[in-house]
Amino acid sequence: MVDIVNRPYATAFETFATARPEVMCLSADLTSSCEVDGFRDRHPDQFLSMGMAEQNMLSFAGGLAMQGYRPFIHTFAVFLYRRPYDQLINSIAYSNRKVRMMGFLPGITTPGGITHQAIEDIAVMRAIPNMTVLETGDATEVETVLEVADSIDGPVYVRVLRGQVPRLFSTPFAFNKLRTLSKGDDVLVLTSGVCTEEALRATAALSAKGVGVHHLHASTLKPFDRDTFIVAARGKKGVVTLENHIITGGLGTIAAEIIAEEGLGVKLRRLGLNDTFAHGASKPYLMKKYGLDAIALVRAIEDVLGHELDITDDALEAVRLDAVHSAEKAEAL
């Protein structure tokens, strides 16, 4: 069982921002939902409530950056690109402003349904010139992503985990560097975000069946650590990607692009939302329904290898990493 950290972003942001007076915390009427309510109360001079006006907030942030401030925008991920897309392009991306967009509840981590689920955000943000795209996968990455984002010369979009977050890693967020979580000769598994925890469960069960899994975790999605991926993919029987996003434009597309461009000639299976919107429900239910969980990964690897491995859901429960985390009720908005 892994450690569960409660509200890691809240503590990390306050520590980070109070040491840097030029940092400005912007919120779009979701202050407590984005874990910066304590910061607001204790450091009002570094906090601005912009209300439910995301278009104005992004333009305002661009202006702050132009004047030498370091704005960090806090809202749900979906509200950082769908509603204010024009302002995102013209006020931030085109002018290459140092604005850090902290997007909470990415993908199906919210029970709020289509209006709140950022399922195509990586595809959109990857397509924007000057934009850097980061994604946190555990409490350690949530705690250490702020300095990474702040070091980048240009706009940054971050998929942030909130609430009770498992601690999977002992080393901090490393910019544009894939984490190697296991090495094996049969299949390369590439995961990001909350899907990495599921893949770790699957890897343990697969190892017991003699399958060699080379598991890479991606926290920088644009740019991308091509070299590590290419070396790991060569000679494998297949590559399987697993992401909390539609399979178009995200991690699976990144892998497809590299495999094609480098002529690697390896099978690719992409797991994620397959050209569909998701229901509003708990994260475990949605991951099971849409094939983003450990058993879905096992079935994809069986497909790549061409034979069944006799691994069941019960076997995966036996190696479950997040018993405490997954027992929690679905978070409210």
Image: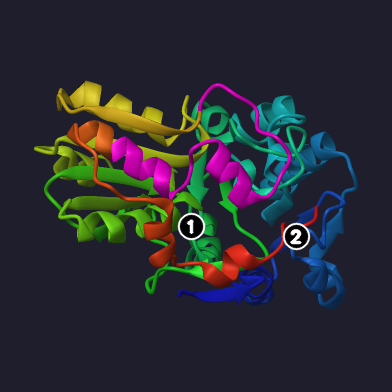
* Secondary structure of the residue carrying numbered label 2: strand
Find residue 58 and report its horizontal and vertical position in percent.
75, 40
Lateral position of residue 179 relative to residue 83, left or right: left
Query: Which amino acid, by three-letter code, is at mark 1?
Result: Gly
Q: Secondary structure at mark 1?
A: loop
- Image-based side of 106 in relation to 260, left or right: right
Query: Would residue 287 be counted in the magenta stretch?
Result: yes
- State the count of labels: 2
Boundaries of the magenta span: 274-301
Q: Position of residue 164 (x, y in %)?
A: 64, 68
Q: Nearer the viewer, residue 98 or 8?
A: 8
Viewer-nearest of discs 1 and 2: 1
Pick whichever of labels 1 and 2 is earlier in the sequence: 2
Percent across and percent down for residue 84 are 75, 31
Give the CA distance from mark 1 to mark 2. Answer: 23 Å
Q: Label 1: which residue?
A: 137
- In the displayed structure, would residue 68 be above or below residue 45? above
Q: Amino acid at mark 2?
A: Cys
In the foreground, 99 or 233: 233
| Crowd rating for badge 1 (residues with CA inside 10 Å; few <14, some 14–19, many 20+) | many
Q: Which residue is mark 2?
A: 25
